[in-house]
Image (tube, grey):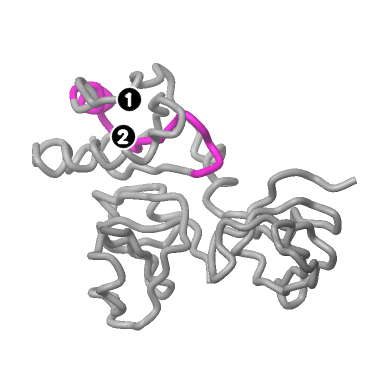
């Protein structure tokens, strides 16, 4: 009978999730069978700090692969219901969490790494108008919302 | 080296800095460095996660791709 695959959480050091996932991927590919068949997928979700998730039908093989991987802290003993991961698979657009007065950091485009305060939000166009904090003259600029990261809420 | 994601097929590639502007899989000129979240699919036929994301081929995919 075919085994049912289950999702297990793997604890990692916070901030090292992607490194652990990439190391895990390299090991699976290097070892070949039966690892490549038993391990279905591995996932790193940005919003979940300190964990990656592995879908497998044989958790013992995951334990073997994790041995000696830097920054990994072992596998959880119980499996996770796939519906718990669902909410992370469809990522909420940044624009939905932004409102006037929020402090944001620009993470892409020509103004990358500058900070600003939101003065207007256009949800239809997915654009945000903000005033740069580091600029000498506080003229407003309009930026696509995906280039922004919220730092803190406004008053 | 930088990692870029294709906006069309969602694949993630490691490329020499700013040297590649065509996706090696779907051949579209739509790569971006603005992505987050990573799923590595080893067995798309029997994976629940790959099925939920409609991924039909093994490989590395970004979960969230910006403009």
- Classify residue B43 as left or right of residue A14: left
Specify whether residue A116 is painted magenta: no
Q: CB under 8 Å between callouts 2 and 1? A: yes
Q: Residue at x 33, y 64 (%)?
A: B11
- Residue A20: numbered disc: 2
Q: Residue at x 35, y 19 (%)?
A: A73
Q: Residues within 10 Å of mark 1 (few under 14, many from 20)?
A: some
Q: In the rendered structure, which disc, 2 or 1, sits on the residue that comes first in sequence?
A: 2
Bounds of the magenta segment: A46-64
Quarter of the image with the C terminus of chain A is top right
A10 to B12, vertically: above or below: above
- Residue A71: numbered disc: 1
- Classify residue A91 as left or right of residue B33: right
Q: Residue at x 72, y 77 (%)?
A: A125
Quarter of the image with the N terminus of chain A is top left
Secondary structure, mark 1, is loop
- Classify residue A24 as left or right of residue A5: left
Residue at the outermost right position: A155
Residue A52 place in picture, x, y as percent: 41, 34
Q: Residue at x 85, y 54 (%)?
A: A101
């Amino acid at each position: 009978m075919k085994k049912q695959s289950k999702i297990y959480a793997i604890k990692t050091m916070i901030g090292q999730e992607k490194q652990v996932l990439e190391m895990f991927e390299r090991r699976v590919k290097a070892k070949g069978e039966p690892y490549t068949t038993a391990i279905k997928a591995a996932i790193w979700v940005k919003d979940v700090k300190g964990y990656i998730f592995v879908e497998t039908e044989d958790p013992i093989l995951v334990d073997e692969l994790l041995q000696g991987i830097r920054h990994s802290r072992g596998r959880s003993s119980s499996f996770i219901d796939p519906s718990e991961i669902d909410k992370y698979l469809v990522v909420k657009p940044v624009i939905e969490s932004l409102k006037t007065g929020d402090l944001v950091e620009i993470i892409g485009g020509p103004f990358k790494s500058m900070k600003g305060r939101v003065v207007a939000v256009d949800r239809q166009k997915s654009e945000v108008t903000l005033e740069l904090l580091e600029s000498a003259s506080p003229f407003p600029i309009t930026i696509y919302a995906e280039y922004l990261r919220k730092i803190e809420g406004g008053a | 080296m930088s990692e870029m994601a294709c906006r069309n097929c969602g694949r993630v590639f490691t490329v020499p800095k700013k040297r590649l502007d065509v996706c090696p899989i779907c051949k579209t000129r739509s790569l971006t460095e603005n992505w987050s979240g990573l799923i590595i699919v080893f067995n798309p036929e029997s994976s629940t996660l790959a099925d939920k994301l409609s991924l039909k081929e093994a490989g590395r995919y970004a979960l969230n791709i910006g403009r």
